[in-house]
Amino acid sequence: MHLPPKSRLFASLATATTATLLLAACGGTGAASSGEAKDFSLTINDDNHIVQQELTTLSTGACKSQNQALPLKIQTLPIGDVDQKVQLLAGQDALPVQFAAGSTPQLTKTLDKGGQVQDLEKSLKDLGVWDDIQPAAAKTVENLYGKFNVMPYQFNIEGIWFNKKLFAQHGITVPQTYDQLVAAAAKLKGAGVVPFSASGKAGWPITRLVSGYLYRELGPDALQAVADGKAKLTDPAYVKAAQAVADLGKAGDFGAGVESIDYDTSVQQFLTGKAAMFYMGSWELGDFNDATKDLIGAANIGFMPFPTVAGGKGSADQIPANVGLPVAVSAKSYNTKVGDWLSCVAKNYGASSLKNQGTISGFKANGDTGTLPPLTQMVQNTIDKTTTSTLWFEALFNTKATETSQTNAASLVTGTLSAQDFMQKVQSDLANG
Amino acid sequence: MRSVLGDRRAIAVLLGPALLLYTLVMLVPMGWSLGYTFFTGNVIEGFSFDGLGNFTKLWQDPQARSALRVTLEYGAAVTVAQVLCGYLLALLYVFVLRKSSAFVRTLVFFPVILPTVAVALMFQKLFAIAPQKGLAGIAFEALGLHHGDWFASGAGAFFVIVLMDVWRSMGFYGVLIYAGLLDIPEETLESARLDGATGWRLIRHIVLPLSWPVVLSSLVFSINGTLKVFDSVLALTNGGPGSDTTPLTLYMFRTAFSYGDYGYGSTIALLLTVVCLGVTLLIFRFSRRDPTKG
């Protein structure tokens, strides 16, 4: 084939253009320059409605001028996709201004090492709003992340919520020891009531019981010792905790089909009176205080810390506390306008969250909080009284061990995985992950 | 035409852009991924050379062995089941329903176009036992089969995945093989019948050999799709309980993007590529034999 000169030129141009376009497409958009945020972007898990709603409320209220300078823009994604999205965006230097900090503190620590996470203690001190952070929340963040580098939009305690009416109907007093808890569960089961509502699909509501037992048996440093390599999850004392929870499952205390129960169904089971007890964090206060969801009534819900274990080193006043799935701030996007927003949030979020959502955050409640619902007030009082807090089972694990723990939790209580094998799997990923 | 194809410059102009595109979007990433197998790290922390470390890890990794076993078992079970069901459907269309098969073909093909996530949610509800018992559980109990929670055991969850994917794809293979069966000349079938070949003998000695090329194509299509299963497992069981239904693809995805280990993730991807290549070569080797001669 002989092409005329014009056609040859056209063909060469077409080829060159195609190649240039493809190379340009493969090259990406390049790294975001420092401090060039065009909006106050937030990428967050879609089930975290409270933070989304409260920031939106602030953007039209107390932080209206900050929002005009840097508009709030929220992007949501399923909680399971958070880690992947954050890692991919970080790899391209394209993290949004605020982003959900990932399923394990390990990821945030890694991002911090790569210079991607803003040191918020320094920023908030520079902005003069450091005193608006609750000291207990700041301490919890430091325990988890090594330093204060996430916004504590939530500050939660965890424990066992129970249906007072069902307890009274079956003559059960609030268990103070683990043996009493097991006896209460047996009594409820015998009366045809599901003792515990738990999501096997999520897994963590079950592993929280393992850590609860461990902290009561071995004291508040039980899992720090594993993180420091001084103990292993396969040590007999640790396997004993997993066995205690496996025994609850063996006795049928989680009801039928725990493997298939997702988070929302487990909440619904408790709030419709189908289960008597529910291990959960105080972030669920929003639903507990919502009469359209809480059919048993907030007045019928009680809270007990994980009970003590006979002869154990821990005590019931050592309550698990966390800052939920917190939000980190991108160091590469930080600028004066972002600082203005953070300053406004620090001053106003605490009161706004309490007033509008009935939930407690890690910010001090400055100003009008309205009349707190009794359950919220009780949680606030418990936080105020707590001197020693503990972490959750996977708090100090790497991502792989966390996933192994949570995906195998249901198998532990359905009996398809022994306590020894469960702990062995997690320990193995801790060592090799 | 010969003069056009004999001109190297013409070939370069005609094939160049497509080849360039293919190289950039397929070959470069594949080469890149192969390169990652000798490194450890990720895009946040950076990469460091690890020699054959990832391959040693793969050899010793019990989770990788388990994922490989799940991949092969799933590939074998679903490939055999969907091609067999597809063949039986095609026989039903051609020899039983004949010209009135259009409605049934449409109905059976319908699940093929449904989104995987929607089908997975439906099967989750069908086989659930909490918060309420699903229809499948009720049906099995009516037949006297009490299974409990299907998703609580690896075998139960595996069965549901296989059932779902066979139900979802058999309509496609039914139509594919149906097209192959239509190509068999009616005269050939008629003369076979006159010679006394009916029923199973007709299928065994006439229909199967003449439709063998399309069956083989279906097998190659199927095995390469099933070895790379990802979405249906992710949506239905998320690889659980534990990692009992985690195939290589899901393990690779998690290793690279959740655990942030791109090098080891790429090594798992390489293993999957080798498995796909090996199985495809095996099928083509097998295809050289005449199936009617044992």
Image (tube, rainbow, N blue to C red):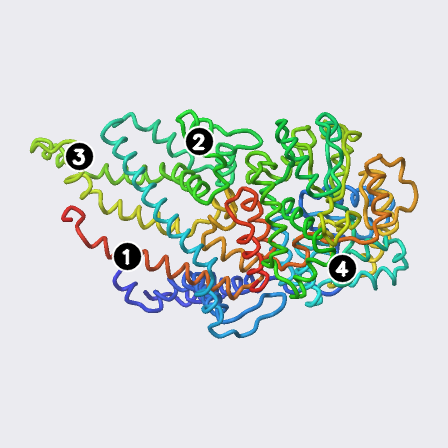
Disc 3 to disc 4, how far (Cα)? 73 Å
Disc 3 to disc 2, how far (Cα)? 36 Å
Q: Are marks 1 and 3 in contact (CB under 8 Å)?
A: no
Tell me if A305 is positioned left or right of B73 in this view.
right
Question: Where does label 4 land, which residue?
Answer: A143
Q: What residue type is disc 3 on?
A: Trp
Q: Are marks 3 and 4 in contact (CB under 8 Å)?
A: no
Q: Are marks 3 and 4 on the same chain?
A: no
**Quadrant for the C terminus of chain A in the image:** bottom right
Question: Where does label 3 land, which residue?
Answer: B200
Tell me if B100 is positioned left or right of A86 in this view.
left
Tell me if B40 is positioned left or right of B171 in this view.
right
Q: Are marks 4 and 2 in contact (CB under 8 Å)?
A: no
Question: Where does label 1 land, which residue?
Answer: B282
Camera-nearest residue between B91 and A335 = B91
Q: What residue type is disc 2 on?
A: His
Q: What residue type is disc 1 on?
A: Leu
- Residue at x 50% of width, y 64% of height: B264
Q: Is residue A231 above or below residue B142?
A: below
Quarter residue A331 falls in:
bottom right
First along the sequence among labels 1 and 2: 2
Disc 1 to disc 2, how far (Cα)? 40 Å
Q: Chain of mark 4?
A: A
Question: Where does label 2 land, which residue?
Answer: B146
SS for callout 4: helix
Relative image position of residue B176 (x, y in whole percent) = 31, 40
